[in-house]
Image (cartoon, rainbow, N blue to C red):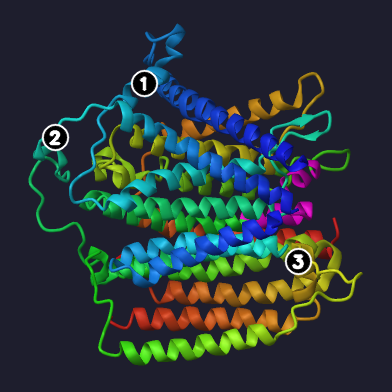
Amino acid sequence: MLLDWGYVAIFALIGAGMVALPLLIIWLISPRSNYPQKFETYESGVPTIGQAWSQFHVRYYLFSLVFVVFDVEIIYLYPWAVVARHLGALAFWEMLVFLVILVLGLAYAWRRGALEWT
Amino acid sequence: MSGEAVVFYLLAAVTLGSGAVIVTSGNIVHAAAALVPALLGVTGLYILLNAEFVAGIQVLIYAGAITVLILFAIMLTEGGTGLGGRQRNEQTAVGAAVAAAMAALLIAVAVRTNWAPPAAGATLPSYTPGAIGQSFLGRNILVFEGTSIVLLVSLMGAIMIARRED
Amino acid sequence: MSWGWEVLRAAAGTVIIFSGVALVAAMFGVLLERKISAWMQSRLGPKHVGPQGLLQTLADTIKLLQKENIVPTRADRTIFASAVIVVPLAALLDYVVIPFGTTRSGPLIFRDLNIGVLYFAATSSLVVIGILMAGWGSNNKYALLGGLRSAAQMVTYEIPMGVVLVTVALLAGSLSTVTIVNGQSGPHHLWYVLEQPVAFVIFLIAATAEVNRVPFDLVEAESELVAGYFSEYSGMRFALFQLGEYGEMFAMAAMAVTLFLGGWLGLPFLPPVLWFVIKLYAVIFVFMWVRWTYPRFRIDQMLSFSWKVLIPVSVLNLVVTAFFVIVVRR
């Protein structure tokens, strides 16, 4: 089993090298001409107004928050899916209780407007 | 040195190096981005311990969801500009003393523990998804249902706090 | 030194898969997209470079390799540069668990991990980090906004996809992709698309959203946000992001084939690898067909659709499936 992951590690390392290879090629062969206007940040052709960062809406944070909770729920579903067939009806009812509790959470988030874009 | 030991030291170096970047970097977004190699290093350590399911969910939850959450949270605040924050304040000496005491305690515990493997013939508990599923749907069912309540409460609490401005 | 032999095998497999993906997914896939979009719009597409335009993408890649490497002054160099590596690498890591067919000694897969399906979900979620880094590192309003919205979108659609993956794992009783394909073979089993049509549709929708394709490509449409999170990337870096996107699209299509369409299974008059390729391109054609048929959604419509429609439907589907599998003991 460790051998499996050794393969994956080699895949990742060599893969990172192969992805970096075109970058090495362009570093070697691409032309360079430096004049300051070229390196300015793009904003439809006009000089940039203010900085790129501005205070963003809290909705991004709320989306990722609800996502984390549901992601944790899904990781409980993975082992259950593997053994559920062998464990009988009790496994089904146990998981149903788990899912109902978390669907209640989704309903709460929906009611409180955490899932709205505005 | 066996192959496993080499891999262990490499992973430890990656994790601790990224940890050092996280703690000392002045740019908070750099610190958050350095979380990713740190968490992936821990993933490798889980794999070395034969816990591949835990490694998978470590990547899925920590490197995939929690890092995104932290990055979103940073971008909501001033830190999103990436400008340097203060790295030290007036209480550096007290902090260093507490850290040293904690380190001494942990090293003492680690040195005194009996790390010898169990008697020959004993096997590691199985960490496959099937075994984990049997465990929390069988003996630890109450813990499992309790976890869902904890998740629900944390979701509700966070939404209440975040939406309080309305 | 048997481990040296293993390292060599792993390295060879990696190079083959990477080159295969770069050729088939990125180069041929882009050309296919241009040709199919052209035929659907009653025009011809690229025809001059090579026979019937087959070398068009090769020419484009060579051109991009010679382009100047521009990094804006105000961009954060470390994060700007590392995002280019993270996105294609995470997309290409998906291919470790995809079975392409069978050989005499077993399935043709890079490595049949015990947690195959979970591994696939995990590497898909790593792409989100790369996109956030690209958006933030560019220090450009369009890129940052595009990156944040893209991350929010990908993250929202990972949940229905995860639930669908769990549903298929429930039917097969395992997280390993080879076991899932084998679970669709034999006299008493059907391809899972027939047992789980709802899950199949949800998977395709979630996959389209994960790779930022129309109708969910608001974050990178030219009329909306210039180019979204990769606005400031030029030349080969742009090509690497495209490699990441098309590679991920092909990986999602390959996973759809593995989970629902029986992987390499088919009648014996064609080798299994060829069956896999045929089904893969059928799913790719559906992706491209959808692209040129539907208008794009607004971001709030897209996110509401996932939270309020896809997640309840997929969870309900899971519960009903579980009822039949466990209680009724199909």
- When asked about the image quadrant of residue A99, the answer is bottom right
* Subunit of label 2: A
The quarter of the image holding the N terminus of chain C is: top right
Q: Work out whether disc 3 and disc 2 sit on a shared chain.
A: no
Q: CA distance from mark 3 to mark 1?
A: 48 Å
Label 2, on which residue?
Answer: A34
**Picture quadrant where residue C70 is located:** top left
- Which span of residues is magenta-colored? C164-183
* Label 2 residue SS: loop
What is the chief secondary structure element of the magenta stretch?
A: helix
> Does residue C138 appear left or right of residue C241 in this picture?
left
Number of residues whose C-alpha sits closer than 10 Å to that of mark 1, classed few (under 14), some (14–19) or many (20 or more)? few
Q: Which residue is mark 3?
A: B127
**Measuring 30% from the left and 32% from the top, which residue is drawn there?**
C235
Point 81% across, 74% down: residue: B117
**Disc 3 element:** loop
